[in-house]
Amino acid sequence: MIWRQHISMALDLLQVSPQGISYICLGGFIVLFSLVSLLIKEKLYVNEVVLGTGFGIILGPCVTNIFAPRSWGFLNDTITLEVMRIVLVIGLFAAGVELPRAYMRRHAKGLLVMVVPTMAFGWVVVAAVIHALFPKLDYISALCIAACLTPTDPVTCAAITHGKFAHQHVREDIRHILLAEAAANDGLAYPFLAISIYLTIEASIQTAIGKWFLVGWLYQVVFGTVLGAVLGFLFSKLMKKSHDQDFIDRKSYIIQYLALSIFTMGVANTIGTDDLLAAFAAGCAISWDGHFHEQTRHDDFSSVIDCVLNCCCFIYIGAWLPFHAYNSPEYGITPWKLVLLVIAIMVLRRIPFLMVVYKFVPEIVCWREALFSGHFGPMGVSAVFVSTLALKHLPTPENPPVNQAQYLATTIQPIVSFVVLGSIIVHGLSMPLFSVISRVALSHDFVKQDFVEQDFAKQDIEQL
């Protein structure tokens, strides 16, 4: 009888909750990944993006249903938006800091070609493909969805800008230009999204274009960039002054990766300007003279934070993916159309344009590098962020949708999320595939050389 009471008391103390299980799974994944991270990242060339997404799918409603963000009701979009925002802001600030001294000034020409016209080309082409595959969406609505897919994701792009394989096989100029492009075009997705939204919800084209120019470009992009640059410049001067007076230690310098990025995001978000561009501009400005980078170059805190945030973020994305919506014939969405869309985007979004204009980008020296740069335009956190942001400006859809705006609100996340999943698979596994191909080519060269040496040996024997 006594032992039964003890068991009952133990069961009362044991509190199994979805939150507790989620924490166990999240922490357990990071622990296990850390134990074999060198093998996975430096030998197999697979990063936390692919593994985290796969683990999130396992945790999600399609498999174990341990972690289901879409079951949170009206809070789902708000939480998703803020999770993606924090990860992007910290990653963009770190990207600005990691670039070489005064990089944006010395490489402005190449960046100008890589960012604005490349994004514009991909925007209109992807919109045309979406409109062709999903004819219920008019071209303006297709432009809105395409705007979510224009930015290059800086988190996924880290697979080719960091790590052993990248440093051995990708030139430094290419790594830097792709990192800077991925960081810059995240914030520049706002104008592409804004004009699409305004054309969808505003009564007249003149009103839509006026708001787009004043709000989308001047206030959000231009003012957001200036705001971030000014904040970064002021903080760089304050920290340098504090360092000269021995008021600040090395640990406090490292903390600024979090503190300054979140502070800049808070200021920009409060006044309604582009917080992503502000964070990137602040990171570039704070390391403009090289002093901040000099103080932090031997510390790995930023990469540690990036790894933890990336693991959490992509586990979240994996559990958030709406697999049930990928087969919705009533909205014109079917799996084969989504697969065709992913293939078309991978081929048409960046590669043709960069193959034509790469001679105007000094950092790209040949067509092979242009092809490589065009291929590596991954879509991930930024696409999820922009699509969730778009929903904030669209009406709540009825069932069935009664107008084009509601139809767009119904279909935007299923289409964008499937493309994100395809990009994670294709771009996340590109490095392992390139590694296998290079090894096969290398072994082929060795075999060919061996045959040549044998032929020479035979000729020498015959002569003797």
Image (cartoon, grey):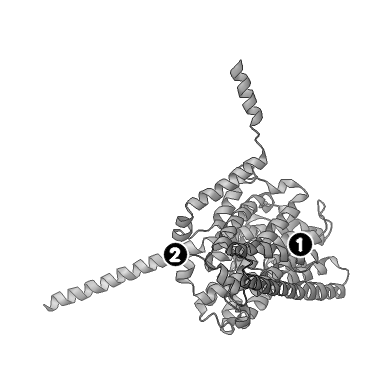
**Residue drawn at (62%, 63%) of the image:** 252
Which quadrant: the C terminus? bottom left
Q: Residues within 10 Å of mark 2 (few under 14, many from 20)?
A: some
Which is nearer the eye, 173 or 319?
A: 173
Mark drawn on residue 183: none
Which is nearer the eye, 418 or 71?
A: 71
Q: Is residue 336 above or below residue 348?
A: above
Residue hosting label 1: 390
Image x and y of residue 435, in percent: 44, 64
| SS at mark 2 in the image | helix
Residue pushed farthest right? 203
Of marks 2 and 1, which one's residue comes earlier in the chain? Answer: 1
Which quadrant: the N terminus? top right
Q: Is residue 72 left or right of residue 45?
A: right
Image x and y of residue 163, in percent: 49, 65
Image x and y of residue 183, in percent: 64, 70
Image x and y of residue 175, in percent: 54, 72
Residue hosting label 2: 435
